[in-house]
Amino acid sequence: SSLSPCQVVDGNLWFMESALTNMNAFTGLTKVGGSLLMKMNFELTDISGLSSLNHVGTNLDITYNYQLESLDGLNGLEHVGRHIELKHNGLRNLSGLSGLKSVGGDFDIQFSSIFEMNGLHNLVSVGGTLTIYSNAVLSRISELSALTSVGGLQIRWNTQLSAIADLPALSTIESTLKVTHNKSLEDIGGLSSVSAVGGNLWVASNQTLCQSHVTALVASIGDGLSGDIASTAENDEGC
């Protein structure tokens, strides 16, 4: 039966190991005060019924929904109070997060089928670490033109990633910067606006990334690096 008159859930709303194929029963939902969890719903293909949702108070976890290819339905979501975890879904893009402006904690994008980062063009800040990890077909990190600060930035083990681009407003990384084991990476020009890194820096084991690009990045950050240069080894020394 439809729960569409329900506009606010003060606590947590969890959908776990269900037979749901869509979220059409929740068309009136505007706010979840606690966490919104969608996990291991193996038949879930459509969350467009959440199109009225604009606020999640704590965590947004969408994981292990293998048939879910789109986040369309979350376009009205502007703020998540703590973390977002997107992991082991069938996602092809992030266009359903086009309204997202801030994440209070970590933002993890892992084990997806996204090709580019399009959809995050309104994201301004991530209070925790933005982690982009092991996305097998991700070729380019772009569309983050509004992002000004992150608590940390980790881009690791994305085997097809060739470019980190279009982050013109990103000036501050509060803790660690880690770009490692992206074997197709050639372009890190999108990090050229970074002027402050509060923790350690790793840009290493990117087999096709010219070492000269790494050296230039470290030099441009200069005294803005508060931690150590933990590693800049095993990039391409031959270019």
Image (cartoon, helix red, strand yellow):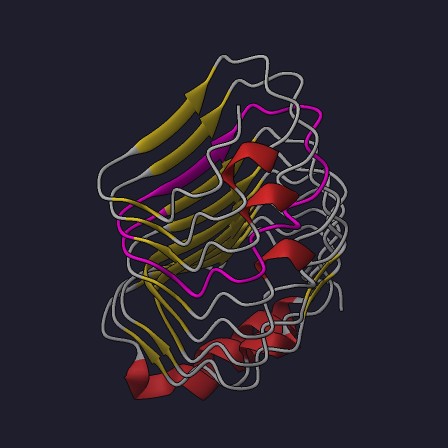
Q: Locate residue 191 relative to residue 152 in the image: left or right.
A: right
- Residue 79 in the magenta stretch? The answer is yes
Query: Is 76 drawn above or below residue 22 in the view shown?
Result: below
How many badges with numbers are in the image? Answer: 0
- Residue 205 place in picture, x, y as percent: 58, 48
**Which image quadrant: the C terminus?**
bottom right
Residue at 27 percent of width and 34 percent of height: 12
Q: Quadrant of residue 237?
A: bottom right
* Residue 157 visible from this viewpoint: no
Q: Locate residue 18 relative to residue 137 in the image: left or right.
A: left
Query: Is 84 drawn above or below residue 42 in the view shown?
Result: below
Dominant SS type (magenta): loop
In the foreground, 51 or 65? 51
Q: Quadrant of residue 218?
A: bottom left
In the foreground, 225 or 118? 118
- Residue 81 place in picture, x, y as percent: 28, 56
Q: Locate residue 154 relative to residue 74 in the image: left or right.
A: left
- Residue 18 in the magenta stretch? The answer is no
* Residue 53 visible from this viewpoint: yes
Q: Locate residue 184 relative to residue 89 in the image: left or right.
A: right
In the foreground, 19 or 68? 19
Q: Quadrant of residue 135?
A: top right
**Span highlighted in magenta in the image:** 57-83
Residue at 70 percent of width and 63 percent of height: 118
Query: Is 192 drawn above or below residue 109 in the view shown?
Result: below
Residue at 29 percent of width and 55 percent of height: 105
Query: Is 115 drawn above or below residue 232 in the view shown?
Result: above
Residue at 22 percent of width and 38 percent of height: 11
- Residue 49 place in picture, x, y as percent: 60, 43
- Residue 180 place in picture, x, y as percent: 54, 50
